[in-house]
Amino acid sequence: MLRLISDNTTIKFIKLKALSFTFSGILSVLAILSVLFVGLNFGIDFKGGILLEVRTGNNIAISDIRSKISDLNIGEVSIQEFGVKSDYLIRVERQKGSDNAQQVAVEILKNALNKAFGKDIDYRRLEYVGPTVSKDLISDGVMAICFAIMAMLAYIWFRFELPFAIGAIIALLHDIILTLGVFSILGLEFNLSTVAAILLIIGYSMNDTVVVYDRIRENLRKFKKMELKELLDKSINETLSRTINTTITTMLALGALYLIGGQIISDFAFAMLWGIIVGTYSSIFIASTVLMFLNIRRSKESES
Amino acid sequence: MLIFENWKKVLILIVSIFAILFSLPNFVSKNSVPNFFKAGEIRLGLDLQGGSYLLLEVESDSLQTDRLNSVADELRIALRNASPRIGYKNLSVINTELTFSLIEENDVDLIKNLILNIDDSLIVDDEDFSSIQVSFSEEKITEIRDYAILQSIEIIRRRVDEVGTNEPIIQRQGDERILVQLPGLDDPERIKRLLGKTARMNFRMVNETASIDEALSGRVPPGSDLLYELDPRTGEKSLPYIIYKRIGVSGDQLVDANPSMDQYNQPVVSLRFDSTGSRKFGDLTSKNVGKRFAIVLDGEVISAPVIREAITGGSGQISGNFTFETASDLAVLLRAGALPAPLTILEERSVGPSLGKDSINAGMYAAIIAIILVIIYMLVIYGARFGVVANISLIINILLILAILGVLDATLTLPGLAGIALTIGMAVDANVLIFERIREESRSGRSNIGAIDNGFKEAFRTIVDANITTLLAAVILFQFGSGPVKGFAVTLALGVMTTMFTSLLLSRGIITIWYNRYKPNNLNI
């Protein structure tokens, strides 16, 4: 059978720690700086506002639409092509004032489009989030991510030991920071599904980490005298074949989703693809490597 | 001989048959499936079948204001009728508080009793006689809010039913929100127009003695309101009227309303009153022949005709600058009844049927391609034996997710489809873990039986540990996510559970049965 990783692979991962820590460190700092100074491109879920997806007939150009809706006095309006040429995404910033003002703006916008294009325009999607809900969604999102991190911490602590939990959380934060960073640097829209993707990345990254940790724990029992560095390398190498295979199958599935799953889902799929690469990397180079510094208790008494 | 208990074989068989039969209605035409298995048909979310999701907030404060206004009316009478008469000034209701002041110091308990006689759930803050504040108690406020929500849900249901959409979901969410889901709706704007109106209608006499000019300059006579008729084209206030506050007949007393045409072929709304309403309407019109009365809807004048003769039959007609559409909308609103308080739309997500269809097609293609890619990969990596086992377990896994989603009547959303695609990728992880372990055990010199047995045993712990983390993430996602994201959490969690079943039982069963029958010398893994 095809072996992507030879059975006798012994890569010295731990030896690379200076390199991998520097690499991750620089990326994390860049990500944090970008989030702080460039910021995230929040979608209407968090910013409030109106998003209208339309399909047009009869070669209506972006400039035709822009000219009809630019002086409606409903704040900043942006239009972009979405997927195919006849589809456009129209975004309207959050209206000043109450929730009612938002609905009024929706009506003004639709009336103007109906008047100008009549039957040549098909409303495919309308999303509108008022200021009250966007605040709720932000706090729900932040809470969800915090809860997820704490739940993982508690679970790993319970199933393994505190150093493992700490190692896992460091890896987790690393993954989240890099994901936020890539969204910031590429200017991708950050919305509710991005939060869902981050939670999923948390789940996946943990999943990957746990598999390696499980092997480390097993080897700690088996090889009581082996040097920790050697033992960590051995554990990572033993699970490497599985790690690669699972990462590839998951990426195959997500890649299909990203490429042909439709415009709406593609950002979500991208976030997860990225998260899986980062999560796989971190479970090897961060989660396992930091165990070197975390003072793992190694029992001397015999126990099988 | 590998041991695999018979009851496990039976369980695997039952679950696999369940998965195949109940996922069937999602693949073939409905008529070719026996009725019983149709339970497996999956309900599609609004983002896949098209429709509207609306989150509404009931402004129950305004209901408190209404109630306090009627308390204010009674209080005025009570203060005036008290002996000796109690002088007051500045009596007004602002939001959820009624305030007034006494002209001279008075017995505090007496005032308090007067107020509590009107409604004993009122709380009176009377520390200072120059400013007495009255508001409702906490319990009463909760009661008012609950009433407002329940009544609003009822009215929304009636309005939605009038428009006729299939299987609407209308439910309370939290303290003062209502979630409305309308699958397959063509024109969300109409429903929004209908929900945006309180539709409180009443018939009131026009105060023809007062001067409009004075009222426009801010001196509206007491007991009257300055209201406007809207221009039908621009929707702006155009014709001012001074109208008595006293309600002649209220819209609650209608039993029916329908759009129709009058003798000039103009759209009108025909009304029918109940018996009390008929009597009141008869009285009002017979006493005021030759005068003007106004039909007021949500504080706007629909029209203000002159009464030509007494109308005693209990039915009438409203004309106003209607189009047939606005006339039928008004009729719908009047039939369904008034909302207890205004509604605000906090959030809307509407998907047109064309996008829904595109999304489901794209999602399905993606899932099918994902399955094919993963199947090929597994065959290449694990060969014709173990690769096939992993792939059988993958397919049963997917069918099982679909069947359970259908039977549980869960909703499949676009993110849910993504969840399935992701499960396809991650599902083989469990098998990969097991196979890698078997390879290792085999390499370390164990017999074939020992390698398989140990492989499953050792991988079991890892699989459980690893999957619980994903399950935790899914549960949290479900707890905090809304709408479509919840759908994602559901498929993800289901995927984790079905994966445990297919890898730990199904794969093991197949491998055991295969091994016991053929006793191969080489596992070829």
Image (cartoon, rainbow, N blue to C red):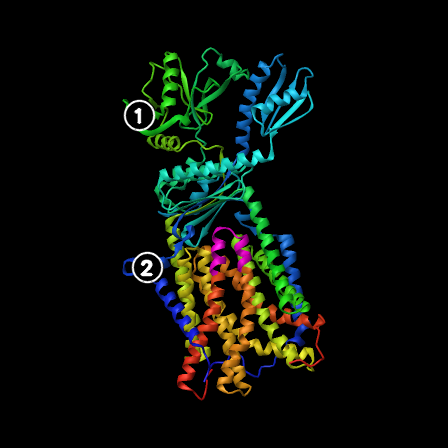
Does dot 1 land on a helix, a strand or a loop? loop
Amino acid type, label 2: Phe
Specify whether residue A73 is in view: no
State the residue at coordinates (51%, 74%): A245
Majority secondary structure in the magenta region: helix
User: Where is residue B2 shown, x and y percent of the image?
Assistant: 46, 82
Q: Which mark is residue B19?
A: none
**SS label for mark 2:** helix
| Residue stretch rendered in magenta on the structure | B474-491
Instruction: Answer above or below: position of B523 versus A204.
Output: below
Front-most of B328 and B239?
Answer: B328
- Estimate the x, y position of residue B160 in percent, counting from the top left: 39, 39
Q: Are marks 1 and 2 on the same chain?
A: yes
Compared to residue A226, the image places residue A292 above or below, namely above
User: Percent position (x, y) of residue B181?
Assistant: 43, 46
* Residue A94, quarter of picture: top right
Distance of label 1 from label 2 (alpha carbons):
53 Å
Residue type of the residue flagged with mark 1: Gln
Q: Nearer the viewer, residue B521 or A65?
A: B521
Query: What residue is rendered at 68% in x and 67% in y?
Result: A162
Q: Residues within 10 Å of mark 2 (few under 14, many from 20)?
A: few
Q: How many marks?
A: 2
Query: Pointer 1: what residue?
Result: B266
Q: Residue at x 41, y 35 (%)?
A: B194
Quarter placement of the N terminus of chain B: bottom left
Return the mark for residue B36: 2
Q: Chain of mark 1?
A: B
Q: Dot 1, how many residues are within 10 Å of its Cα: few (below 14), some (14-19), or many (20+)?
A: some
Which is closer to the viewer, label 1 or label 2? 2
> Can residue A290 be found in the magenta stretch?
no
